[in-house]
Image (spheres, rainbow, N blue to C red):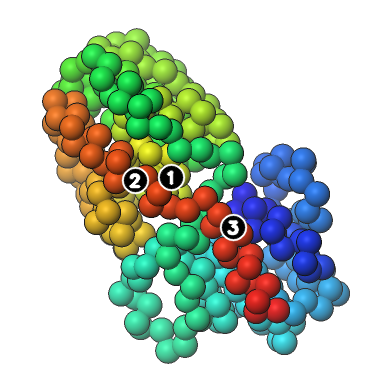
């Protein structure tokens, strides 16, 4: 989605195309787009296509690529990464980074790309709209506090189920919206059984693209960090980040300092600490309202356009 949104702002000014590597699971996002795109099975299948087009600039939006594949690409092309956790950053010429905070590990690189950084480079879906303070207060003032859980596409550790169990035992009067990604592979029966036994009202949602159309009714979202935290800040909903990896903290440090989210370090205590925080916030909703107001205008809506304009200046 990020690549598509950026390319959508480039295509009018440059001969450009998108290469999707992998299976067809994400191609439905491209069906209504007029961006030129191709689907290939592997990075090595993409190489001849890229070399044939002799690009002046190649944009990478991925987590990993082999050194062999990278060395096989045209040597004269500028290399740009949209991912700050790409494993070949040292080989890039430019990097777009959605926060001003840099991880300490970057200082260890002998060579590093030019960094274009800041919240203005956060790429969000175009239909994502901030909610009004009036509507947020309306939801916040309901007797049962609305809490959303969105722990990522696959939620490999199944922290969703653990959170439901802990919230059921330790917090009173909640409505819990549970967003499950398309890659969620755990037993739905376990979730349904937990929901049936739980003291709270629980609504299960299986969606990736449209989850905020429902989760915008929540007063706080429990998540694993990632883009969800930035989307929540843009919409105006405080996020409680329960990180899985310690070295991800820098991605949310700026938003935490701006009072747009709360971030917990990874570890065995994190889930219980998160539940304790939800319990405290249920009794102290003024804090949530303050966080909601802190999110306003924090993340501009035109991150894809800002990246595209900078890329066009590089060509």
Q: What x and y, as percent, mark residue 189?
A: 44, 18
Q: Is residue 275 shown to the viewer in this render?
A: no
Residue under the image location 21 percent in, 43 percent down: 270
Q: What x and y, as percent, mark residue 16?
A: 78, 65
Residue under the image location 39 percent in, 63 percent down: 99
- Residue 295 shows which numbered tag? 2
Is the residue 40 above or below the residue 191 in the image? below
Q: What x and y, as percent, mark residue 132?
A: 40, 32
Report the front residue among 2 and 309: 309
Measured in 3D between alpha carbons, the distance from the residue under mark 1 to the one under mark 3, in whole angstroms, is 14 Å
| Chain-order first, disc 2 or disc 1 | 1
Q: What x and y, as percent, mark residue 203?
A: 42, 18
Kindly indicate the quadrant of the structure image that contains residue 187.
Answer: top left
Q: Is residue 104 shown to the viewer in this render?
A: yes
Residue under the image location 36 percent in, 37 percent down: 237
Q: Mark 3 points at which residue?
A: 304
- Residue 234 shows which numbered tag? 1
Say whether marks 2 and 1 touch (CB < 8 Å). yes
Kindly indicate the quadrant of the structure image that contains residue 202.
Answer: top left
Element type where label 2 sits in the image: helix
Report the front residue among 22 and 299: 299
Report the front residue among 44 and 300: 300
**Mark 3 Cα-neighbour bin, 10 Å: few <14, some 14–19, many ≥20:** many
| Chain-order first, disc 2 or disc 3 | 2
């Amino acid at each position: 989605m990020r690549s598509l949104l950026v390319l959508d702002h480039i295509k009018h000014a440059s001969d450009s195309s998108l290469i999707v590597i992998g299976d067809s699971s994400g191609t439905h996002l491209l069906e209504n787009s007029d961006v030129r795109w191709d689907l290939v099975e592997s990075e090595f299948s993409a190489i001849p296509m890229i070399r044939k087009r002799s690009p002046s600039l190649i944009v990478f939006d991925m987590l990993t690529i082999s050194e062999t594949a990278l060395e096989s690409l045209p040597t004269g092309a500028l290399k740009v990464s949209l991912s700050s956790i790409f494993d070949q950053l040292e080989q890039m010429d430019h990097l777009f980074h959605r926060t001003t905070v840099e991880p300490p590990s970057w200082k260890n690189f002998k060579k590093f790309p030019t960094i274009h950084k800041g919240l203005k480079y956060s790429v969000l879906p175009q239909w994502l709209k901030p909610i009004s303070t009036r509507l947020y207060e309306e939801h916040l003032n309901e007797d049962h506090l609305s809490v959303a859980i969105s722990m990522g596409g696959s939620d490999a550790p199944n922290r969703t189920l653990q959170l439901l169990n802990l919230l059921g035992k330790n917090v009173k009067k909640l409505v819990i919206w549970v967003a499950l990604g398309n890659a969620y592979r755990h037993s739905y029966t376990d979730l349904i059984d937990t929901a049936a036994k739980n003291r709270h009202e629980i609504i299960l949602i299986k969606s990736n693209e449209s989850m905020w159309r429902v989760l915008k009714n929540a007063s706080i979202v429990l998540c694993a960090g990632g883009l969800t935290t930035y989307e929540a800040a843009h919409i105006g909903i405080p996020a409680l980040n329960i990180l899985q990896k310690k070295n991800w903290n820098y991605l949310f440090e700026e938003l935490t300092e701006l009072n747009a989210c709360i971030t917990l370090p990874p570890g065995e205590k994190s889930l219980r600490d998160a539940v304790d925080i939800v319990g405290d916030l249920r009794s102290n909703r003024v804090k949530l309202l303050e966080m909601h107001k802190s999110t306003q205008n924090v993340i501009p809506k035109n991150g894809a356009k800002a990246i595209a304009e900078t890329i066009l200046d590089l060509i």
